[in-house]
Image (tube, helix red, strand yellow):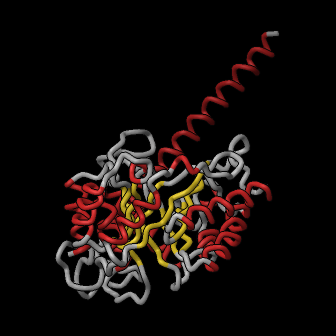
Amino acid sequence: MIAGMDRTRRWVRRAARAALALCAALVLAAGSLIVALDFEAAGDLTASGNPAASGDPAAPGSPGPARSTGDDAEWLGHAWVDGRRTQSDVDALAAALRPTGIHDLFVHAGPFSDDGTLDPALRPRARWLVDALHTALPGVRVQAWLGAHPTDDELHLGDPATQANILAADAQVLDDGFDGIHYDFEPVNDGDPRLTAVLARTHALTRSRGALLSVSAVHTEAWSWMSSVTPLLWSRAYLHAVAVEVDQVAVMSYDTMLPSETAYAGYVRRSTEIALAAVPPGVTLFMGVPAYHDERPTHHRAAETVTAAVRGVRLALGGTPRDRRVGLALYVDFAATSADWSAYSAWVS
């Protein structure tokens, strides 16, 4: 009996030491990752690793192409289509957007029901809004932002009947005058074939209607090994597989849990470099910018700032002229502050 108790104690001690060692290893790995991301945010190197001829391409006012070329976007909340916004709101929005590089607007018009249908009562003012924005901002494209949670107990994204309902809902939204469909399905794990299947079917529809198809992409891996650790991070290969099925990709490079602005800027730089390599040149790439200020475990508002995101993107683009459409996408209109817009202006100027 005593011998058995001794063996149990030894096992408990060994298990405790193993657990402590694992915790220490995780802390060390997290610390090393933060240091690596800080380093990415600190330098004035281009994505190729060569010193930028113009100095630091992320510095406001620096020469070179690391600034807006008029290929930016913004997510707009549901109030624009449910009757809460009026013509005066459209006029104010138009005045704010004219000096910017924002030419795509993703207006929340969903979500899909669990069976893939879309209730028209969610968007009673959709046609009015699209017409009003087209009048106030000629050339701006207004896309219907639609999505749902493709989980086992909600939207069954791989079900043929659900996909058919989604496509029927898309057609109805395009009938409202929207210039395109912007999908935001979360969560989607790395390599999930259901999303690419829906995108392929939807792209056939949007092409036939002369409309755009864009999609929000969840976090991309900052280094190539990360997606093998957690499927919540998309690999470069899966981002490419998604991108070839659409006209535009918006990488949601926020909700990273990172604790500091420098680490976050470094992550955005890495994420932008990965996206530039994965997304075909003919597909517009938006890097999502966190113009919201929640405080929660996945998002620290003092760390994930517009300033840090702009710096990360500009470092990734470096001092090399780009021959493709790359821009920022601000999330979200109703939470953005004057400080957020001021930080975004560094990208425009």
Residue 10 at what x, y percent from top left? 70, 24
Vertical placement of residue 147 versus 316, above or below: above
Q: Residue at x 22, y 65 (%)?
A: 95
Q: Residue at x 56, y 80 (%)?
A: 210
Among the 4 quarters of the image, the one containing residue 61: bottom left
Q: Does residue 36 appear in the picture of this structure?
A: no
Query: Does residue 116 appear to the left or right of 252 in the view shown?
Result: right
Vertical placement of residue 135 versus 261, above or below: below
Query: Does residue 163 appear to the left or right of 331 in the view shown?
Result: right
Residue 308 at what x, y percent from top left? 30, 60
The quarter in which the C terminus is drawn is bottom left
Q: Residue at x 52, y 80 (%)?
A: 283
Q: Residue at x 38, y 63 (%)?
A: 74
- Asked whether 206 or 188 is in front, the reply is 206
Q: Residue furthest left?
A: 61
Query: Does residue 230 appear to the left or right of 342 in the view shown?
Result: right
- Asked whether 316 or 44 is in front, the reply is 316
Q: Does residue 195 appear in the picture of this structure?
A: yes
Residue 65 at what x, y percent from top left? 29, 84
